[in-house]
Image (tube, helix red, strand yellow):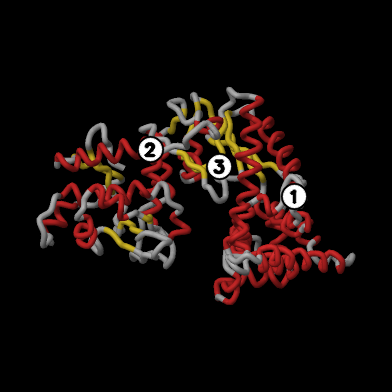
Amino acid sequence: MADVQSMCWIIPGSIDMEAILKKSPPEFKYKVDYFYYIIDTITEASDLEDLDNNAGFVNLQAKRLQAFNHNYGKYIDYLLGKVIRRDGYIVGKKSFGYCINIRNEDGGLKAVPIIDFIARKNLKQEYAEKKKNSGIKGKKYDYLTKWFNPQLKIDGKKAREKVEELFPPLTGAIRGTKKGQPSRTTKRYKSLIAIEKFEKQEFYNSVDGNIGRFHSNIANIKKELRQFITYNGQQLVNVDIKNSQPLFSTLLLSRGLYNKSSKPINIYNIPSVLPLINNTKNINKTITIIDHYIMIVESSESINDKGFQKYIDLVNSDDFYRRMASIIAPNKPYNKAEMKTMMFMVFFSSNRFIGQPKAHFKRLFKANFPEVYEVFVKLKKKNHAALSHVLQRIESTVIVERSAKRIAEEHPTLPIFTVHDSIATTKGNEEYIAHIIKEETYDYTGVNAQIGFEHWG
């Protein structure tokens, strides 16, 4: 995250590029600033990527790297193994992913002056282009983007102290990163970069075209750091839909969702999900199979809590995860994190994953809710992303397209910030926000949402 004003690279403090180059001189004529550019770019991009779903790597397009330095490949090859790591390239699907390959977490971030004139020139051009394209174009979401202004601030000192608390110095033997997961160091620097962006008022926003989520500095920053964010000096309160994805998953068990004439919501209203359900022209056939299965289950339900009702009642209970645990693991101490992990597996993993050793809880869910599990299987038959895609699209419609928009129309001077299944606002306005979310959830889906409050600060 280069500081263009002071013309400095911002990189992990433990990287001593001069010492690395002295110890192992490159076999080509180089400019040290081009090494720093790659390190800076990877570090900065970690704030924007979902590291947990990408094994800690950030995807960088070759076009961007080449625009800054047409010989970037030599610099990448030199840094591999010494400073960075790289994952695989998939033609037509993803660029190479990179991450910083260091274990030493000392030093935080540091500024390194940019020496080369051409590097300075290229950086200014890249910064101008990035600034031009950093936000949502047009006025469609100005009811959200307008609040990312100088009144939105973070207590950087306290936030950094929290980062040190979350990632204390390691003791004992150094262990490697778990396969498929980002390292502690990567997560730590992601948090530090997020804080720096807040302090420098480098705000960004975008909307996912597939699931409709509004991404921003607030949505992407580590949740433990949100308590240090204020607007116009006021503390913020986050108002969320409790267990939103399990709640919306109950809609998948209703035949109405698969009927084109159902209003206001049906699966045909989510065009981007249809190819995921069936990547051929037989989408209607697949949906008909799901609908027919639901009809059979509904007609065979008995008073013994069979079929879907057991799951629906559980989701609508006051303590969903605790009650789920009493069914799934009645002889074990209650562990909410395990239950959340189980639901994540059920919603997000592929059907084939159920045979893996780590899918123990997914198999328990199937054993206790076989009819519900079968509907999810049918939805994910062609692409396992279909189920989560539907749930997240419903969630974003309720929060971004309906609740936040209505709040902006009724109270245009009330600051609001969306975080996926929730809306944050200034303290004292949370009950009003909760009322709107409950009403819009019911009007759009027909289900009653339970609301939770989280005071930031």
Disc 1 designates what residue? 318
Whole-percent x and y of residue 311?
76, 60
Is disc 2 surrounded by few (<14), some (14 to 19) or many (20+) residues within 10 Å? some
Look at mark 2 in the image and give the residue it sits on. 197
- Contact, CB < 8 Å: mark 3 with mark 1? no
Which dot, 3 or 1, sits closer to the camera? 3
At 62% from the left and 34% from the top, the residue drawn is 404
Pick out the residue farthest to the right: 303
Residue 186 position (above or below residue 162): below
Is residue 375 rendered to the left or right of residue 413? Answer: right
Measure the C-alpha gap from mark 3 to mark 1.
23 Å
First along the sequence among labels 3 and 1: 1
Q: Is residue 167 left or right of residue 386?
A: left
Q: Amino acid at mark 2?
A: Lys
Badge 1 crowding class, 10 Å Cα cut-off, few under 14, some 14 to 19, many 20 or more, is few
Q: CA distance from mark 1 to mark 2?
A: 39 Å
Residue 329 at least partly seen: no
The residue that appears at 42% across and 39% down in the rendered structure is: 159
Question: How many angstroms separate mark 2 from mark 3 (CA)?
Answer: 18 Å
Kindly state the secondary structure of the residue where label 2 is placed.
helix
**297 over 46 or under it: above or below:** below
Residue denoted by label 3: 419
Disc with the residue nearer the chain's start (1 vs 2)? 2
Residue drawn 24% across and 47% down?
Answer: 68
